[in-house]
Image (cartoon, grey):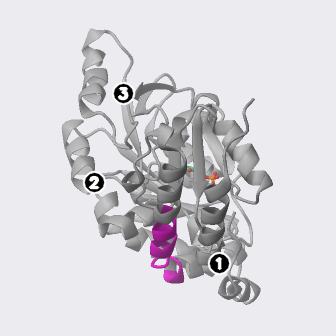
Amino acid sequence: MTQPTAAMREAMAGAVVGDDGYHEDPTVAALETRFAQMVAKEAAVFVPSGVMGNQIAVRVLTRPGDVIVAGRAQHLVSFEMGAAARNSSVQFATVDDANGALALREVLDIIDAEDDHQAHVAMVSVENTHMPSGGTPWDVAAMVALANAIGGRPVHLDGARLFNAVVATGTSAADYAAPATTVMACLSKGLCAPVGSLLAGPAELMERGRIERKRLGGAMRQAGFLAAAGLVALDTMIDRLAEDHARARQIAELFADSFPEAGYNPSTCRTNIVAFDHPQARQIVDELALLGVEGGTVAPRRVRFVTHAGVDDDDVAYVAEVLGRFKPSVR
Ligand SMILES: Cc1ncc(COP(=O)(O)O)c(C=O)c1O
């Protein structure tokens, strides 16, 4: 939903570019180095989308037939159109992630089942922030405990909104990434870049990741124009995410008051996503959109509204006004 900022447009117009297919784009190289430093990994690869970042991680960390353990509501499992199966011939063993974190006991049981003639668990994937639960940030201690408990198996961190988690918890990106082998973060979404995500990890894996990016059709040429906006995103757009979080909390409280039957606890809204279950979820979303309050559903009975740089205090006041008089029509 976000638009590139004026500073991004200026940086894009003036970007020094080259053919990234030959590693000759200095702006892409600068962005990859910058992100690798932020997450304290050896190397990073610039990719067109978060999905591609996740899919490359799967390609370099698994073999066909392997199992990935992940939360059942995670993007990698539920929102990538079966890409992991299609691209990498892997299967998921899913565990409860209703509150964002993975149920560790369930993860360990799936790994333990290898001794009972079940398929090899090649990796565990976590999502931070966890979108479907309402942008829930992980407690870094829980990530460390998970990584320690799974006996050296790789963890992939889907950090599409990693910097929302950083701002909400005060945990650094490097600390969040430390228990993970690979980490993906998006420059679009809350950080407002027009295109692009980054995957970071060990240098040898990232070299293989470049080949997988090519196979998936994601190698770009003068991509420095996009990377230039990404550098502005990393340099200037992280701290302001706190504003999105504060407005989301206000909106969460408005929804909790308007729909008491949902039993939504607004204090669970810790970043920029307001998400709750309601039997009339689709109707609420459709009818509020007609009044200019636009959101969506992420599951049949689950409503989601998101704040971002394009939502200001006047917009929050408008939501309050609309919700003050709104009731879904009886159907
Ligand atoms: C948690 C998570 N991971 C990955 C992605 C994929 O990002 P993209 O839309 O850039 O492919 C998204 C997109 O919404 C997401 O929410």
Task: Quote the CA–CA distance across marks 3 and 1.
Answer: 38 Å
- The circle on residue 139 is 2
User: What residue is at 20 percent from the left and 37 percent from the top?
Assistant: 149
Estimate the x, y position of residue 121 in percent, counting from the top left.
Answer: 36, 27
User: Which one is nearer the viewer's eye here, 281 or 204?
Assistant: 281
- Total marks placed: 3
Element type where label 2 sits in the image = loop
User: What residue is at 80 percent from the left and 53 percent from the top?
Assistant: 290
Q: Which residue is mark 1?
A: 229
Dot 2 crowding, Cα within 10 Å, few <14, some 14–19, many 20+: some
Would you place residue 126 above or below residue 159 in this image? above
Estimate the x, y position of residue 275 in percent, counting from the top left.
Answer: 52, 47
| Residue 74 in view of the camera | no
Marks 1, 2: nearer the viewer = 2
Element type where label 3 sits in the image = strand
Please state the extent of the stretch shown in magenta in the rendering: 235-248
Estimate the x, y position of residue 258 in percent, counting from the top left.
Answer: 54, 50
